[in-house]
């Protein structure tokens, strides 16, 4: 009787390599259990290849999503791009503050010496830290109201980081002319209203820099307060 080439279950591979042919002898008197090599028997190996392609596709998708998120992070500029920040005396004298609204007059929109001094000071506040209106007023020998007024008209936000200034109570405070409070009361001539769009942008900018506020709008970590020195 001629030798029969078969694949037995005992010869099945332990790895995911395709099965190999094995020669068995009928001398044992036992009828070998035969496993036929069919297209169906190769499906597990085809599935492995398919799963590997799926994994690679998912990884590529994740890389694309991450790239889009990073691009969005880099272009978050409050819906507008600020003008270049002038450094020389001549450039500052020539600078005219852009109109905040279409049709707004630009007359008398020069940046004052005090405002330039304040904006220069803001640029020394490191990312991930905040200061208060009162602290800046002390450093500039001025008043919190004057500081707040200059911050409201800051044309260089968020490059000049007026979003890093909060109230002396460590409350989130105002941003871009919008003041956030808990009620519609009058404080120092400023109307306090509920949270608005600009305040939400301020909270988001600070969150991205690692500064967070609690549900009531107060600074969570007091160690984030800037000590008034250059970074």
Image (spheres, rainbow, N blue to C red):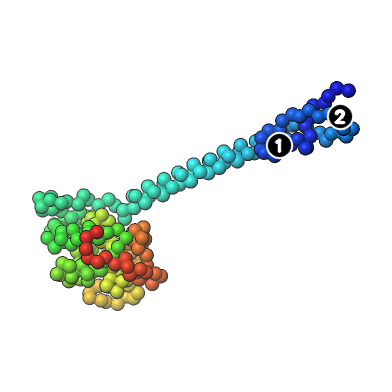
Work out which quarter of the rendered image holds the C terminus and state it.
Answer: bottom left
Q: Residue at x 37, y 69 (%)?
A: 220
Mark-to-mark CA distance, 2 and 1: 22 Å
Secondary structure category for the residue under label 1: loop
Position of the N terminus by quadrant: top right
Task: Name the side, left or right, on which 150 lies relative to 1.
Answer: left
Give whichever of 12, 147 is nearer the camera: 12
Asked whether residue 220 is in view, the answer is yes
Q: Which residue is mark 2?
A: 26
Within 10 Å of disc 1 (Cα), the crowding (few <14, some 14-19, many 20+) is few
Across and down, in percent, residue 60 comes to 49, 42
Q: Residue furthest top?
A: 2
- Name which quarter of the figure residue 46 lies in: top right
SS assignment at label 2: helix
Pick the residue in front: 27 or 211. Answer: 27
Identify which residue is drawn at 57% across, 41% down: 54
Q: Is there a contact, CB below 8 Å, between mark 2 and mark 1?
A: no
| First of labels 2, 1 by sequence position | 1
Q: Give above or below for 151 relative to 96.
A: below
Q: Residue 66 location in percent, x, y?
A: 43, 47
Residue ID at (23%, 55%): 156
The 10 Å Cα crowd at callout 2, few under 14, some 14 to 19, many 20 or more, is: few
Q: Nearer the viewer, mark 2 or mark 1?
A: 2
Residue name at image x 79 percent, y 34 percent: 8
Percent coordinates x, y for residue 93 in the rendering: 10, 53
Which residue position holds label 1?
A: 13
In the displayed structure, does residue 59 sit left or right of residue 166? right
How many labels, in total? Answer: 2
| One can see residue 175 in this view | no
């Amino acid at each position: 009787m001629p030798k029969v080439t078969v694949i037995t279950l005992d010869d099945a591979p332990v790895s995911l390599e395709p099965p190999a042919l094995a020669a068995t002898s009928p001398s044992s008197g036992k009828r070998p259990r035969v496993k036929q090599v069919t297209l169906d028997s190769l499906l597990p190996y085809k599935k492995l290849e398919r799963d590997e392609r799926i994994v690679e596709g998912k990884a590529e998708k994740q890389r694309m999503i991450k790239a889009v998120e990073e691009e969005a992070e880099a272009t978050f500029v409050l819906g507008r791009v600020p003008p270049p920040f002038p450094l020389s005396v001549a450039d500052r004298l020539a600078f005219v503050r852009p109109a905040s609204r279409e049709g707004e007059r630009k007359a008398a929109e020069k940046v004052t010496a005090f405002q330039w001094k304040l904006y220069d000071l803001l640029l020394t506040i490191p990312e991930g830290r905040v200061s208060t209106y009162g602290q800046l007023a002390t450093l500039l020998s001025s008043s919190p109201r004057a500081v707040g007024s200059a911050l409201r008209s800051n044309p260089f936000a968020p490059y000049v980081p007026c979003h890093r200034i909060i109230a002396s109570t460590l409350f989130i405070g105002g941003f871009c002319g919008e003041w956030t409070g808990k009620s519609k009361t009058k404080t120092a001539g400023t109307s306090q209203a509920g949270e608005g769009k600009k305040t939400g942008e301020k909270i988001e900018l600070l969150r991205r820099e690692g500064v967070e506020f609690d549900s009531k709008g107060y600074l969570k970590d007091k160690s984030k307060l800037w000590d008034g020195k250059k970074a």
